[in-house]
Amino acid sequence: MAALAISALAVVAACTLPTTEAKAPEPTVAAEPTAVPAPRAPAPAPAKDIYDVEIEPLTLAQCGQCHPTHFGQIRDEGGKHRFDCRECHEVFHAYNPRLNNWDELMPDCASCHTLPHGEKFPDCIGCHINPHTPVYIPFAQTRVADACADCHGGPATELAQYPSLHTDQACTLCHYDQHGYIPSCFECHQPHYQGQPLVTCAECHPVHMPLEMAFGDKTDTRTCQACHTTAYADWTKTPSKHGQVNCGVCHTAHPYIPTCQSCHGDPHSASLHERFPNCLTCHLNAHDLPVRRR
């Protein structure tokens, strides 16, 4: 019995005695940094009245945001009406269909323009149908085509005083589509030569009296050759001094033919001029004078 107790104590002692084997050191764990608390959000501002603001006048661009068609018309074809909308529209956004107050709100043309065309034309919108494009006056929608002479007295007088085929035409045959349209002569007439500049037409033919042609030393002589082919061919090849003189210097009007004396006087003796009164008896061709050719 005593031996059994001693054996049990020996077992307990073996279990509790420290072992002689080395233990590996346990890893060191870094300490976590202390968290910094986030700043507190500011307290919400007290609710503000949405109408507690200063009202600024509308800008031109803001008008265009709601009225892009009118804005574009004035921008592109407004003429002298290209200014701030509110200079005409002093009262706006006040139309009431029950009151039918449209005419009261719309600007009065006469407040700026009075009657620029006189008492005979008091209805501005009758011709200027769109105040946002005031220079666009379509003939088909206005009465202006029936009253050209009331404003354009000069052309009307010229057409009547100097009859031509132009006199027999209505103004709108040339000035068609809209007021202010100036056509090209080549819409009806063929040029005198290939590549003729348009500007040369009116230099010889005043538009409303086209037969009253006047020439000068700057006249484009290529226009002459379209009809006067023989004379032009002689003149361009002559070695005489006449080849250095523009057609319009001698032929100052169509179909004016000058006398030689208008430039040269009487260069020979009186007896010779009496014997040969016609200069071309000896000089043959005014456009190609017989001269000594070298």
Image: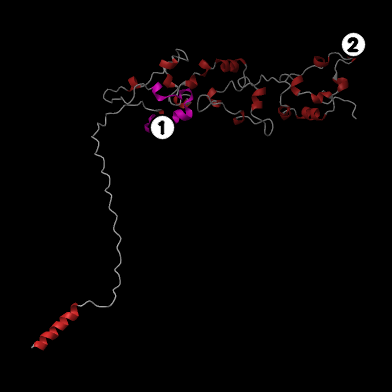
* Label 1, residues with CA under 10 Å away: few <14, some 14-19, many ≥20: few
Q: Residue 191 vs residue 35: left or right?
A: right
User: Can you tell which quarter of the image residue 246 is in?
Assistant: top right
Reading the image, the residue beneath label 2 is 270
Q: Position of residue 124 (x, y in %)?
A: 43, 19
Give the camera-side residue of 57 and 188: 57
51 above or below 6? above
Residue 203 visible in rendering = yes
Name the residue type under label 1: Thr
Q: Quadrant of the image for the C terminus?
A: top right
Q: Position of residue 59 (x, y in %)?
A: 39, 28
- Closer to the camera: disc 2 or disc 1? 1
- Judge whether residue 243 is colored magenta: no
* Label 2, residues with CA under 10 Å away: few <14, some 14-19, many ≥20: few
Counting residues from the N terminus, which is met first, the one under dot 2 or under dot 1? Answer: 1
- At 57% from the left and 18% from the top, the residue drawn is 155
Q: Position of residue 141 (x, y in %)?
A: 44, 26
User: Can you tell which quarter of the image residue 175 is in?
Assistant: top right
Disc tally is 2
Q: Residue 14 vs residue 74: left or right?
A: left
Q: Secondary structure at mark 1?
A: helix
Label 1 near label 2: C-beta < 8 Å?
Answer: no
Give the camera-side residue of 281 and 172: 172
Reading the image, the residue beneath label 1 is 69
The residues tagged by marks 2 and 1 sit, at their Cα atoms, a distance apart of: 82 Å
Q: Which residues are magenta?
A: 62-88
- At 62% from the left and 30% from the top, the residue drawn is 186
- At 40% from the left and 25% from the top, the residue drawn is 85
Q: Main secondary structure of the magenta part?
A: helix
Q: Secondary structure at mark 2?
A: helix
Name the residue type under label 2: Ala
Q: Position of residue 97 (x, y in %)?
A: 28, 26
